[in-house]
Amino acid sequence: MLERPGSALAFFVLGALAAALSLTLKSSAPETAEIRPVWREVKWRFPSDQWGRGKAFRCAPTACGTEVEVFLRAKIGFCNCTTGVKDDPELERVADLDLFGDARMAAAPGHAIAVRWMKGRSRGYSFPMSNASAQSVLAIAFNDHCDALVATVVAGNNRPAELEPVVLEFLNGDVVLHWAEVALGL
């Protein structure tokens, strides 16, 4: 069989273009590093108030993809005993949003969550900062009868809602369960 002149060159050029396109597509695809959270207890960084100091945990960027802080507090007798943390107004009432200032904007409507046997709600908020940027937090509250347990999540990527599944897994773990049992007197 006779080859046409230049067909080998055309084949080589097409192959090189296909390889270059493949490398371009691979390099522009987002890398999805697997998150393997490692939570370490750290010092509570807020002043003491009527609810006292809570528990604080940190997950480093190497384990969570960005720095994540979770602040936990029990608010004994502060939850609606009839409905629990069932809607956004009740979440706002029991959450620790005031730790970040009074001016806030909800990112979206909240949604129901569960932590062990307790039901609650989660919602993202943005807080304007003085330098025209905003800090965002994820407020999570769940209850056992009339007692609320509140988690406030701050992420270094300013998108803590994206980390909600990782945080809920932590909240459903043994460390938080033992803390909740002690805090609630169970």
Image (cartoon, grey):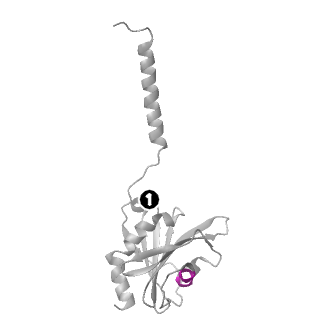
135 left or right, relative to 7: right
Image location of residue 101, percent across then percent down: 62, 78
182 in relation to 151, above or below: below
Residue at 47 percent across and 33 percent down: it is 21
Which quarter of the figure is the C terminus placed in? Answer: bottom left
Image location of residue 147, percent across then percent down: 44, 89
Residue at 62 percent across and 66 percent down: it is 134
Which residue was labeled with disc 1? 65
Indicate yes or no whether the magenta region holds residue 91. yes
Bounds of the magenta segment: 89-94
Indicate yes or no whether the magenta region holds residue 139. no
Image location of residue 108, percent across then percent down: 58, 68
Residue at 47 percent across and 48 percent down: it is 30
166 left or right, relative to 126: left
Which quarter of the figure is the N terminus placed in? Answer: top left
153 in relation to 89, above or below: above
